[in-house]
Image (cartoon, grey):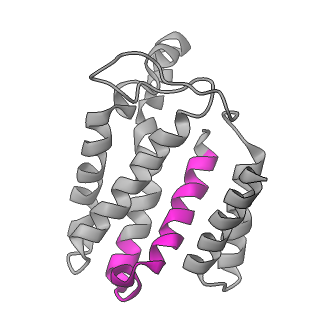
Amino acid sequence: MDTGTHVVMGFALGGLATLDPVVATSTATATSVLIGTVVGSQAPDIDTVLKLRNNAVYIRHHRGITHSIPAVLLWPLAIIAVVYPFFPEANLLHLWLWTFLAVFLHVFVDIFNSYGTQALRPFSHQWVALGIINTFDPYIFLAHVVGLVLWAFGYEPGITFYCHLSCVNWVLRG
């Protein structure tokens, strides 16, 4: 997926997290979880800095080690190590869980486009690419933007994104 879609998915996941009673009852946890989901939804793409060297290096390595099994496990730890000191009263377990989910979903969703990832590294260096969706899918992006706009207009984010996911699931089955 593209950066913009990962951003809106991170915010959507942060909104969905408000259905978690631990998140809903603590401002510190809710704020730190929102930060964790947005950063976690971007973290695996840090290898984009390889574009500074040249496009060939970037294309050869993008979605490689930063999208691997060890990275999916390490990104949430690195993110909460930075976020948690600013919110020491936040629930650490729930901060980790939601941040982990954001990182995992980033890598999982990237598998569905034709470029794919090396998500099975270190067990396999093969690229896993299903080619089902485009790198930028306007329907996925706009569906999340609609949810974010509803949230901005005062709709409860957890229910909004839960309904959003239910509608998307219904359309995909259709």
- For residue 162, side relative to residue 122 (left or right): right
At 60% from the left and 79% from the top, the residue drawn is 159
In the picture, residue 67 is in which quadrant?
top left
Q: Residue furthest front?
A: 174
Which residue corresponds to the image point at 52% horizontal and 10% vertical from the top-left? 56
Residue 25, image x, y percentages: 36, 89
- Position of residue 33 measured from the top left corner of the image (x, y, whole percent): 38, 69
**In front: 171, or 91?**
171
Q: Is residue 9 left or right of residue 139?
A: left
Q: How many discs mark residues in the rendered view?
A: 0
Question: What percent of the width, then of the height, locates residue 87?
Answer: 26, 75
Depth check: 78 or 72 in front? 72
Please determine whether, in this image, residue 122 is positioned above or below residue 106.
Answer: above
Let me know if residue 19 is in the magenta part. yes
Q: Residue furthest bottom?
A: 25
Q: Main secondary structure of the magenta part?
A: helix
Q: Which residue reaches farthest top?
A: 56
Where residue 81 appears, as percent x and y from the top left, is 21, 57
Work out whether 116 lies above or below 27.
above
Asked whether 49 or 139 is in front, the reply is 139
Q: Is residue 109 magenta?
A: no
- Residue 17: quadrant of the picture: bottom left
**Residue at the image position 72 percent from the left and 60 percent from the top:** 170
Q: Is residue 54 above or below residue 31?
A: above
Residue shown at 66% from the left, 86% from the top: 154
Q: Which residues are magenta?
A: 4-32
Q: Quadrant of the N terminus?
A: top right
